[in-house]
Image (spheres, rainbow, N blue to C red):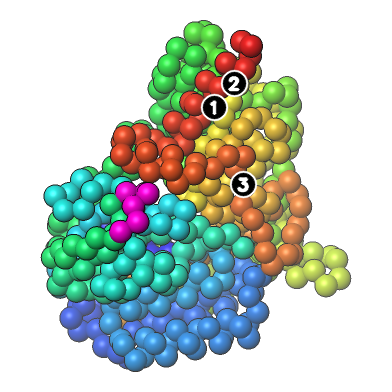
Amino acid sequence: MIKKGLLLIALLLSSSFVLGQKKYSELTKEDYLNDFDILINIIKKQHPNPFRTISEKDLDAKVAEIRKKLEENPSYANFLLSNPIPLIHDAHSSLSTDSTVFEDFTKETSFFPINTIVYDGKVFVNQHNPTIPVGSIITKVNDVKSEDYLKRINVTTDGSIEADDAKDFSFYVSLMSPEQEYKITYLDSLNAVESKEATLKAVNYARNYYNVQKAILPVDIISYSYGIYGQKVNDDTYCLTIKTFAFSEEFAYQKLSSFFEKINEEGVKNLIIDIRGNGGGYLSNIPLFYSFISQEKVFKNNYRYATKVIDINVRENLIDASGRQYSDMDIKNMNNFMFQRYDKSEVEGDEYYYGNNRLDESYVENYPRDRYFFEGNTMLLIDNNTVSAAAYFASLFKENKRGIIIGQETRTCSNFTTASWFINYKLPNTQTIVDLPRSEVFFNNSISTEKGCRGVLPDYTVDEKAFYRSILNEEDPELTFALDLLKRQAQNEEQ
């Protein structure tokens, strides 16, 4: 996955223009290929377990194929499209564009003119516009099938997970086909048989950004501002939306305790917890959040860190959060930190170093339920953008049979993922930031060496008809499904 410097996703690291940095217009074929080769070296030598899901031989073959295409058509857009990180199937590893380079790029390219959303393999129009009706299914762009575009969009996922609905169709079509106008073939309703066509002019970055802000889905935008946001849905039901688990324990507890004290005082029967789009956070926070809904007085909170790469093997281009190059002393201190907190396995044939007690001093295996716990009916909403620590929360929820799960498979695995501390490299020419985790983490102390894994799977998924109705009615599809299910449950209890 590419994290754009300005578009949709905030840049992980603040980048400043430094003397000697190349401008976007000065980047050459050799620059792109050199950065690509450096990136491959970093992945192979510094990722904690790069060959879990793909052999080195297969990785080399696919990398050679991607590199050849970049060599044949060297451009900044193709460099971004040539991102090899999805090949190792690690949802935590990523690229972030340099804000200055990306801004210059956006001023010289064109963008797809309509905001879209992908669901169940179809591309829906997700914005009011004067030409193509909302909810229309785009089947072709410039005579290329939408499904062919989608196949070329690589999303970073763990294991064998396919997170097609996390794909940003409009942005990637802009990278793949930066035209001055787009011939769009579409069906104007879900049941339509006859295709229609419209030719629209491309838009600039400013208009593209506007289109993103005017998207119909997701409906719940306010929760992104608060991080943790609770609201009353009806007399019997509240919804608690959690967009991140990265808050301090003190702040999180203050928000959660106030919310749960309130709903318990009001005698609320149903609680819908929404962790769609939650990018994770502190793993140690997960049992704190779960303690407010645990049905057991004490529940198990088991996870274990492990890595196959304890040293900093690639020193060049390693930077800190401010963009400063690490010194030899900095790297020595980083290595010492890891050796103090990871111990080599004593089992023959086991290549892992395992985290010891110094690694996570906040770890509590037998976690007590909170005094404000909620014991009513609870549902959980997840999607393809539920990742990292959020997937562990979903895993706890499912393992303890706490309630019904609605939505889509999480983008990280239900039994392990990568996590812990992250390191960053700045590619010398494009200034792109490479973000890599330093460790894997196994949930429930289950050390898995299997190549494939699946995310947390929902009990119910919204079908495309219900999703289509939600776009037309400007309603939240999963929340609407959950409320309908609660209504049916209540009716069955009355009978």
Q: Which mark is residue 485?
A: 1
**Where is mark 2, residue-wise?**
489
Region in magenta: 189-194
| Residue type for callout 1 | Leu
Q: Residues within 10 Å of mark 1 (few under 14, many from 20)?
A: few
| SS for callout 3 | loop
| Residue type for callout 2 | Gln
Structural distance between the alpha carbons of marks 3 and 2:
22 Å
Task: Verify CB contact (< 8 Å) between mark 2 and mark 1.
Answer: yes
Q: Earlier in the sequence, mark 3 or mark 2?
A: 3
Q: Give the mark count.
A: 3
Structural distance between the alpha carbons of marks 2 and 1:
6 Å
Residue drawn at x 68%, y 51% is: 415
Q: Is residue 469 left or right of residue 298?
A: left
Residue drawn at x 47%, y 21% is: 238
Q: Farthest residue in the front direction? A: 194
Residue 445 x/y as whole percent: 75, 49
Residue 412 x/y as whole percent: 57, 54
Q: Where is the N terminus found, in terms of image quarters?
A: bottom left
Of the two numbered discs 1 and 3 in the rendering, the one whose residue sits closer to the viewer:
1
- 292 relative to 98, above or below: above
Q: Residues within 10 Å of mark 3 (few under 14, many from 20)?
A: many
**Where is mark 3, residue-wise?**
457
